[in-house]
Amino acid sequence: MTNLKAHNRDVSVGKILSAIGHEFLQTDIDGVDCGKAFAQKQRGFQLLNPTDDWFPGLGDIKVHLQSWEWTSGKTPEFIVKRSLSGTCEVELKVVKGIVLPATVNFQLDSNPEQQNQFLSFIATFEGKPFSPQLLHALDEWAMSRSYEIYQ
């Protein structure tokens, strides 16, 4: 691995992207470089510069499509179920990317004090945006506490 600037001070991300784009346009379906004339015959394909200079308003669209409202807020309703070390079943309902209060069903012989600790822990998920990190935290808690749940 090397820094390209160490070999060519004139290199930039934009120039690399442009070179890759031009190479793509002049390569046929078999991967053969057919030259610049081939790039001119691409039937509507052309190299574009996706910036606000070329496409006014593109930056605003990008910001909108990267926003939480677009990426998570439009998520359909779903339910995640987890069985934690045989001690309890947890059900997280997620609406528009937000975790609702969890449903927890404990085994009959579980420790009431530990149940309350777990319920306090799982209550911290309520109202938060759903993420893989929440599931990881749930799994980690269960792994670290599973021996304590039983009397």
Image: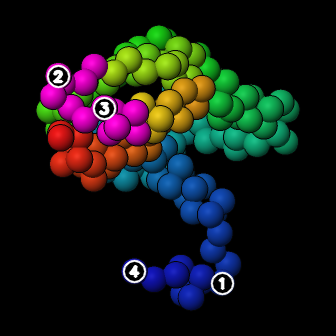
- Classify the position of the C terminus by image quarter: top left
Is there CB contact under 8 Å for labels 1 and 3?
A: no
- Mark toward the start of the polypeptide (4 vs 2): 4
Q: Report the front residue among 142 and 45.
A: 142
Helix, strand or loop at label 2? It is loop
Q: Residue at x 32, y 49 (%)?
A: 140
Q: Nearer the viewer, residue 55 or 70?
A: 70
Q: What amino acid type should be assigned to the residue bearing mark 3?
A: Pro
Judging by the rendered image, the residue that carries numbered circle 2 is: 108
- The residue under label 4 is 1
66 with respect to 129 (left or right):
right
> Mark 2 and mark 1 in contact (Cβ < 8 Å)?
no
Total count of labels: 4
* Quarter holding residue 87: top left
Q: Which residue is mark 1?
A: 9
What secondary structure is found at the residue carrying circle 1?
loop
Q: Tell me the element at label 4.
A: loop
Secondary element at image label 3: helix
Residue interval drawn in magenta: 105-118
In three-dimensional space, the C-alpha distance between marks 1 and 3, rounded to whole angstroms, equals 67 Å
Please name the residue shown 25% across and 24% down the image: 106
The answer to whether residue 116 is magenta is: yes
Q: Residues within 10 Å of mark 2 (few under 14, many from 20)?
A: few
Numbered disc in front, either 1 or 2: 2
- The reply to whether the C-beta atoms of the residues labelled 3 and 4 are less than 8 Å apart is no
Q: Earlier in the sequence, mark 1 or mark 2?
A: 1
Q: Position of residue 32 (x, y in %)?
A: 31, 50
Query: From the viewer's perspective, is the residue at label 4 or at label 2 nearer?
Result: 2
Q: Relative to 13, does residue 61 appear above or below in the rendering? A: above
Q: CA distance from mark 4 to mark 2?
A: 57 Å
